[in-house]
Structure formats: structure tokens, C-alpha cells
Image (cartoon, rainbow, N blue to C red):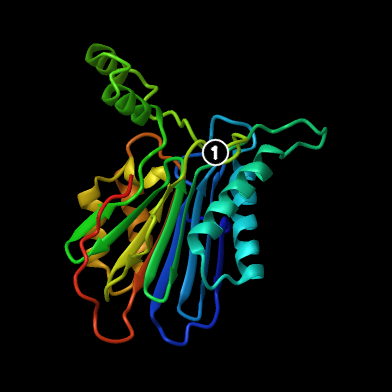
Amino acid sequence: MNRKNIISIQTKNSGRQIAAAADSILGSRKEQQDFAGLVVENNQALAVVCDGMGGLEGGALASSRAVELLVSDYQEQRPEAGFTEFLSKEAIKMDQCVAMQTNQEGTLLRGGCTMAAVIVSDGLLYWLSVGDSRIYVLRGDSMVLVTRDHNYLRELEEALGRGEITKDYYESELLTKRTDALTNYIGMGGIRRMERNANPLELMDGDMILLCSDGLYKRLEEDQIKAMIVDNQISVQVAVRRLNRMVMDLTVKGQDNTTVILIQYHAPSEPLQYQKIQEEG
């Protein structure tokens, strides 16, 4: 296990509305390029996962700097409202910061990273993502992916839907190794799109929010992820560690860095009326 890449600050949580835990593994990689941040205070939480782009120099610096910037600004500003706007502005700021990172000789590092971030406040969930790190919401026996990956596969699907490419071309591209290539990320010097919820999601008692880098969902099926969390929902700390243990147990060849954060919400009074979780997009 390697948790030095997690900035975890657990402070006052008097109402016990939020339980949260983070865990990370190196996998079979030589360098850790996943970084994460978690802040829980007074029944409000911030969580973020950033995955450095392994094919670019400076991926580890990009993800660590992005997380440090977001956590620092959050703690300094102490936002109590306007969370979607806060996350949006921070994503732009993180992008500019990472894009300008240089080495000791002053040469641009050309690093990049993904970003998946949430804020839980007063029983409401706000989220934003850039890249292909994901956010899931678990309610009862259902688990819903609320983000969409920013990769070449999505570009192909949208181009096909607009009639800009043929079905034959689309299917031929699916056979290549390019479909997972990121088309949007922090550090490109101008984010093309952000996935975010226009309206906050009202959380019910027991709802769980999972943030993860692609090392998790590219190794485990969604049913496996859901089952592990549900079976261990009595402890978010146990759940995240067992998820990563399962990742390594099922690894045959190489395994990417894998980072997971799990947040469980406990309503202070009567549960809210059932609200169906819908994908944003």
C-alpha cells in the first residue's frame, strides 16, 4: 500500500453525517502518478482524485500540484455556497497551473492529469470531472456512473451520432488501441469540456459516493465494485482497502496506479423521499 499520495484531513465532524476514506496502490508501476485529497469538516466534505498522464513527462507533478491547489483553496476560502462555480473556477485554475509547470531548466514539463471532484454539503452532492477518472453514486442496490469519460471513444460516438463519420469507420476505429486516449484533461492549456451536475443531487440516508482513477474500473467490472462496497458498507475504510486488494488479486500482468475515495452520507433526520439518480451528460 502507498498512501503518501493522499492529502487526508479529518477535522471536526460533530454531526457524524459523513464517513469518508481513501486508499491508493502503486500497482505494478514504478512511479505513483495518482494523487487524491479528502477534507471532512462540520458535515461538509471535499474529495478529489487526479490521475497523472503516464505518457507525458511530469504526470506525477501535474496530479500532485492540482490536488494541492484545490485542497489549499478550499481550506482557505471555506465556501458555504456556490459549490459548482467554485469547482469550475478551480478546474480552470488547476489547468493553467499544470500547463505552466517547468523543470529546473525552465522547460515546460508538458504534464497533465484527470480530475474527479465532489463536495457534499447539507445533504447535497455537487460534482465535476475532467478526463476519465470517475464518480459513481450508490443508492440501495443500484450504482450509477454520473460522469462521462473524455476520450477518443466518446469523440467517435458523438461524431457518429452527428453523421460526421460512417458506421464502418467507427467500427474500424474500435479495433485500434486509441479509444482510451484522453481528449480532454487538466494541463492542456484550455479545458474543452467539464462534466458537472447543473443541480445538486439530494442525498438519502446511506447513499455512497465513489471516486476512482481508471485503474479501478479497468480491472474490475461494475458489478464487482458494487458488490464489494455493499458487502463492506459498515466501514468505508474497510471497503476502499478491500477494493484495492481485489484489484491486485485479479491482476495477471500489469496494473496501473489505483486510487479510490468512498463517502457515505447519513441523514440527520428522516430520509428524503426517493429520488432516482440520473446520468448527467
Instruction: Identify the residue position indicated by label 1 in the image.
Output: 191
Across and down, in percent, residue 240 comes to 37, 61
Say which residue appears at 37% left-offset and 27% top-offset: 155
Amino acid of disc 1: Ile
* Towards the viewer: 41 or 29: 41
Across and down, in percent, residue 142 comes to 19, 59
Whether residue 281 is visible to the viewer of this picture, yes or no, is yes
Number of numbered discs: 1
Vertical placement of residue 27 versus 260, above or below: above
Left-right relation of 190 to 180: right
Left-right relation of 157 to 181: left
Secondary structure type for disc 1:
loop
Vertical placement of residue 89 versus 104, above or below: below
Vertical placement of residue 198 versus 111, above or below: below
Farthest residue in the right direction? Answer: 105
| Quarter of the figure with the C terminus | top left
Across and down, in percent, residue 255 comes to 41, 39
Whether residue 3 is visible to the viewer of this picture, yes or no, is no
How packed mark 1 is, by other alpha carbons closer than 10 Å (few <14, some 14-19, many 20 or more), is some
Say which residue appears at 35% left-offset and 68% top-offset: 238
* Towards the viewer: 120 or 29: 120
Across and down, in percent, residue 123 comes to 37, 74
Say which residue appears at 54% left-offset and 41% top-offset: 113
* Towards the viewer: 165 or 57: 165
Quadrant of the image occupied by residue 231:
bottom left
Quadrant of the image occupied by residue 31:
top right
Left-right relation of 142 to 160: left
